[in-house]
Amino acid sequence: MNETGITESVAAATLAGLQGATPHRLHRLFVYFGSPARALEAVRAGRAAEAIANDPQRAAITRRWQRTADPASVAAVLEQRCTRVWAARQPGFPFDADLPDAAAVLFAEGDCPEVLERPRVAIVGTRASTPPGNADARAIGRYLGEQGITIVSGLALGIDAAAHQGALEVGGGVIGVVETGLDIVYPRQHHLLYAEVRRHGFVLSENAFGVPPTRARFPVRNRIIAALCDAVVVVEATAKGGARITAKWATRYDREVLAVPGSRRNPAAVGCNELIADGAHPLLDPSDVLTAIGRHSPATGARPAGWGESEAKISRAARLLHAGMAGEPATLDGLVVTSGLAVGEVAGLIRELERAGRMERARGLLWPC
Amino acid sequence: MLASIRSATLLGISGQPVQVEIHVSNGLPGYCVVGLPDAAGRESRERVRAALLSSGLEWPQRRVTVNLAPAAVRKTGSGLELAVALGLLVAAGDLPDSALDGIGVLGELGLDGGVRAIPGTLALVDALRCDGVREVVVPLAVAAEAALVEGVTVRPARSLGELRECLKGELPWPDPPDPPDPDPPDPDEPDLAEVRGLAGARRALAVAAAGSHHLLLVGPPGVGKTMLARRLPSIVTPLDPEHALEVTRIHSVAGLAPAGVLMHARPFRAPHHSASTAALIGGGSGGRIRPGELTLAHRGILFLDELAEFGPSAIESLRQPLEERLVRVSRNGATLDLPADVLLVACCNPCPCGMARRYCRCSEPQRARYRRRLSEPLLDRFDLRLAVEAPRPSDPAGPESATVRAQVARAVARQERRYAGRGWRRNAHVPARALEIDSPLSPSTAALERVIATERDLSARGIVRLRRVARTIADLDDRDALTDVDLLEAAELRQDVL
């Protein structure tokens, strides 16, 4: 706290909420004036232009900021919502603020900020994921959660949500990095997941309250995910998806990238396969992540649940049917034709496989797992 | 100066006897029709007048009143004109009073005095027969159709002048035309053997044909859903004579029946997805309620391609008729029950992208939005729901239609035997109680049914539907007892495909 009675947190939050306060400008302000509180003081005194001397809009911005900066109301909201604010180069900022294009201010809300102290791994992927992809993300999330690793993801539909759910199932730590202000839940159907993430970790955003989701903000958000973690696991990614962007940032920030290989026929696996071709580490087993971040995998050697062959006993005919699917989804038609059995018999085998957890129904198709 | 002729008008898909009364009296020359005629009925004055004059007869220069009794029923169409013309001749004393005793008269007039065909002859003649008429005068063009009604002598009429002489006994009645030959079987009729792969879907098609279970096929474009559904007519059993008459009657009213032949093939109706609610379930205004596609497909197949593209209200309007097998249409002044015992076959894509590459590119919200186009209650009406995918070129072609048709016919015969004398004929319509008594399950099979019901979270109605399909599967395989395999297959043929 300084002589004006405004904390660094409130000052950082006030500045981040100003119109036109890009991370780049915020960094300049913080560095030039020395701290967020002193920067806010200068902004209110109409001296912002000194820090952003080369900015063509500096005059307009200085006037607008001087007029609109309102630390009192920001402080009230922060207090009411119990929001933490971390400013670059201040204590608590979770990563190196000198990374290129790093965020300048982060808002965090949640019950377990200490999950930051553990190793952090991001699990990301496409929203248009396949059921096996979701199952993989969940299994990896569960495995890493058990190993005491914090799972960082984007709280989006598909892979992101599955990874969070996997970690939450085993009581692991989670961080959800979102693109909206923290008072907005997007997508709406994830409000329960948001609540769970807040309870077992926290949600994080660089945007002030009330900022709505827009198409442009998702890829920008991904650089925070990459900055926060020690390694990025891409489970399923389309050729041009946001997960590819996260992986690009991770490479830039010198984080390890792992990708789960998939069928060339699966458009949701194309991105992963391309990442592997570009040098990402293929993830064949969840313990590969531990190796990648420099930890030794536990000696038990047991495979994580939901990964690879399960122990349940199935008949020879059911095994042949499963093998005949070659990892690809199928319909009843396809199974009847490939097996040469009657429809009734195939129906019995499908049920057996389902009960053994070797087959899953989704979108009207049968997926081997 | 009064004449009274018996005729009939259409009310929905059935006939309504009408008494055409003609009163000719002194007074200012004039012509007035009362008794709720429609526009065609009011215009009939000009046709009747011209026809009389063209036939060399006299148009009375007196006050003419035509009453169509019962007066409170709306009369539709022009089928009463011939009766009006003959009534004028009787009233003018040109024809003896007794010439038309007990004779029903149907037909429209041309300006030249010719007698023209009218729609719905079968229904109209049938209504007259029920009213005690044993002899009917009908236009020559539809005489063969009228002859399908048993117990009625059909008198074909070519023109008003000729008809007058026949009635006077001056000319013999013209011979009724020979009934046209029924169409020879079409050698190009699509055959199931042309479809490759799709083994499960073929099976579902046979089950649908045998037990009259509604079928929904879901799959990407171009895999053969439509091709398969269009081959359903080639495996269903033909109509029995009673149903053939019923179907011909409906199609005659709609002007769709081939003249003079009974329709033995089950109707196959495939409305486009832009069809309105009224087009599907029937509608119209005033006294003229027209049968919709559901009624035109009565005792046959209603095929809705691209089900998800139909208008939501149109498609949801099918729910009640599918359950009750009749449509109740209420319009200003009339409520009609139209029969709608159809086998519904529908196709749709699984999602907006059509899952063309097995792996769909749609996001979850897009898929959810698409799914919401079809309501759960509607999807519940389908006993058979199947996902289909593109067959590989190497997949074998299945059996020919003739083979499947024989199998279906056997299963149908089993059902006819089992349900003889009851209020239903097919497995899809069996009430739950009767199903329990006719097809009891062994203790182990009943246990499996309970397990499946728990796993699939089936409602009581869902369990009954499962058992009905299992019953049909056993019938197709010519077995009396239901086995575990029948139940498993029935469960597999009814999946959550969307």
Image (cartoon, rainbow, N blue to C red):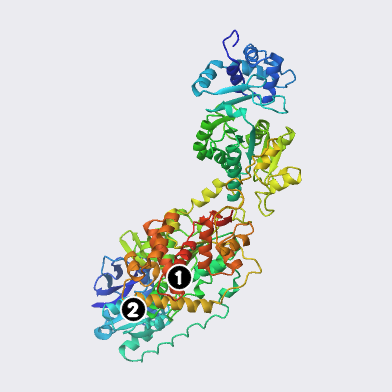
Q: Amino acid at mark 1?
A: Ile
Horizontally, residue A30 falls left or right of residue B415, namely right
Residue located beneath label 2 in the image:
B125
Q: Quadrant of residue A149?
A: top right
Please rate how many residues cluster around mark 1, counting C-alpha atoms within 10 Å: few if below 14, some from 14 to 19, many from 20. many
Please rate how many residues cluster around mark 2, counting C-alpha atoms within 10 Å: few if below 14, some from 14 to 19, many from 20. many
Say which of marks 1 and 2 sits in front: 1
Instruction: Note whether B21 is above or below B177 in the view shown.
Output: above
Q: Amino acid at mark 2?
A: Val
Chain for disc number 1? B
Residue A170 % position (x, y): 54, 39
How many tags in the picture? 2
Residue B362 % position (x, y): 59, 49
Residue A114 % position (x, y): 58, 27
Residue B232 % position (x, y): 51, 71
Residue that protrudes farthest toward the top in the picture? A3
Q: Quadrant of residue A312?
A: bottom right
